[in-house]
Image (cartoon, rainbow, N blue to C red):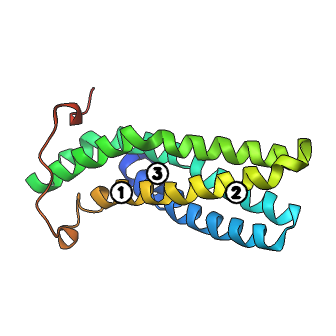
Amino acid sequence: MIEHLSKPEYVHVLLNALPVHGLAVGVLGLVIALLSKTRAARVTALALVMVSAASAWPVYHYGEAGYDRVKSMVDEAGDKWLDEHMRRGKQLIYVFYVVAALSAVGIVGEFAAPKAAVPLAIATLILAAANLGVGGYIAYAGGRVRHKEFRFEAPPEPQPEQHHDD
């Protein structure tokens, strides 16, 4: 079991739900925190959002590291979905970083600038909610790489910038 942790594609699959599912929990928590109007709840929810959004970095890292191994295992349609998944991840990973950074600013704001705390939390909520859509968009392609049962349409046609650089 432990030997699987040395395979980046395995670690990617273990972690890949955290940015989206964790972010969904954080967004829900942030809504509840804003409604409850308590600092402790906002800080807790902002921390959940921050950790969940920041977890996209190791997911992306291990996905890139496992790309070649997965590419050698998939069928032709899966290969196209893999390239699309990689393209989407590469283009949109920065949204997760911005959400993580804004969450961190929101946490600091709770203590350093209390009057800015609620507006920062609201801004984080809006961006984090949008980030859920981004995460779903990336995951949509990823779920079709090896799961033929999820392929409801033809794979996207490759674009020149889709090819993985190594």
Compare marks 3 and 2 and give the one earlier in the sequence.
Answer: 3
Dot 3 corresponds to which residue? 5
Q: Would you say residue 117 is visible in this rendering? A: yes
Q: Is residue 76 left or right of residue 148?
A: left
Dot 1 corresponds to which residue? 137
Q: Looking at the rendering, in which quadrant would you find the C terminus?
A: top left
Residue displayed at 87% across by 61% down: 39
Tell me the CA gap for discs 1 and 2: 23 Å
Q: Residues within 10 Å of mark 2 (few under 14, many from 20)?
A: some
- Secondary element at tag 2: helix
Dot 2 corresponds to which residue? 122
Tell me the CA gap for discs 3 and 1: 26 Å
Q: Is residue 85 above or below residue 139?
A: above
Kind of residue at disc 1? Tyr
Where residue 92 is drawn, which disc sits there? Answer: none
Closest to the observer, 28 or 122: 122
List x then y, in percent, for residue 77: 11, 55
Kind of residue at disc 2? Ile
Q: Looking at the rendering, in which quadrant would you find the N terminus?
A: bottom left
Kind of residue at disc 3? Leu
- Secondary element at tag 3: helix
Residue displayed at 39% across by 54% down: 10
List x then y, in percent, for residue 116: 82, 47
